[in-house]
Image: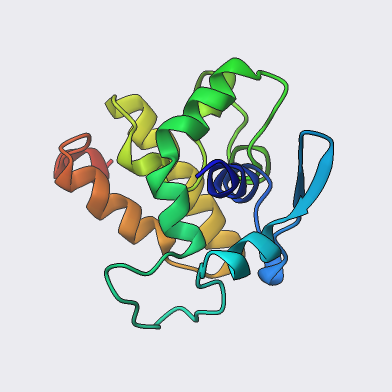
Amino acid sequence: MKLLLFCALQTAIIGSGNKVFGEFDLEGEKIGVKAVYKEYNVRDDLGLQSKIQPGELTPRRLQRFFRVQVKDYLEKNEEVVPYLWKKYSDLDLRYRSVTFPGAESLVETKEEGLYLLKTYQRLDHLLSLSISERIKRVLLARKILDIRDLTH
């Protein structure tokens, strides 16, 4: 579990562009995320429309599973900045600890939800993606936002 938590921290904070997952330091040893994924059968080779089974692990599922720990880590380590916040937000420090992949499932206020959504909308615009549509659905389903919040 500890290795998978560190992998989730690495990818939620640093990112994983072009299927490069990087490495982390654990008790003085450099450990490659890709090697951990291989050892624990984490599916990191899937495309956008791939079908996965309920029991299969993916990097995204790990990020969601460990989202509380990621937020806690960010709150305790103010010098650590998640890539999503650093690259795509307007850098409001109040929302640094809730601006990472998976945070849509734990934000608690309308302000946090709107900030995260705006960040994903900027990412979508810059990279021609549509991730913010899924973020909207999650925030609406969790009643963090309502439809009126999306029409302004």
Q: Is residue 4 above or below residue 131?
A: above
List x then y, in percent, for residue 70.
Answer: 51, 34
Q: Nearer the viewer, residue 148 or 96?
A: 96
Write the residue at 60% across / 50% down. 7
List x then y, in percent, for residue 149.
Answer: 23, 38
Q: Quadrant of residue 75?
A: top right
Q: Is residue 18 above or below residue 61?
A: below
Q: Nearer the viewer, residue 34 or 89?
A: 34
Q: Is residue 35 left or right of residue 148?
A: right
Q: Is residue 107 left or right of residue 118?
A: left
Write the residue at 15% across / 37% down. 143
Which quarter of the figure is the C terminus placed in?
A: top left
Q: Nearer the viewer, residue 84 or 115?
A: 84
Q: Quadrant of residue 112?
A: top left
Write the residue at 67% across / 70% down. 19
Q: Is residue 79 above or below residue 51?
A: above
List x then y, in percent, for residue 68.
Answer: 41, 32
Q: Is residue 21 above or below residue 141?
A: below
List x then y, in percent, for residue 55.
Answer: 31, 67
The colour scheme used here is: rainbow
- Counting every numbered tag in the picture gives 0
Write the residue at 50% across / 45% down. 1
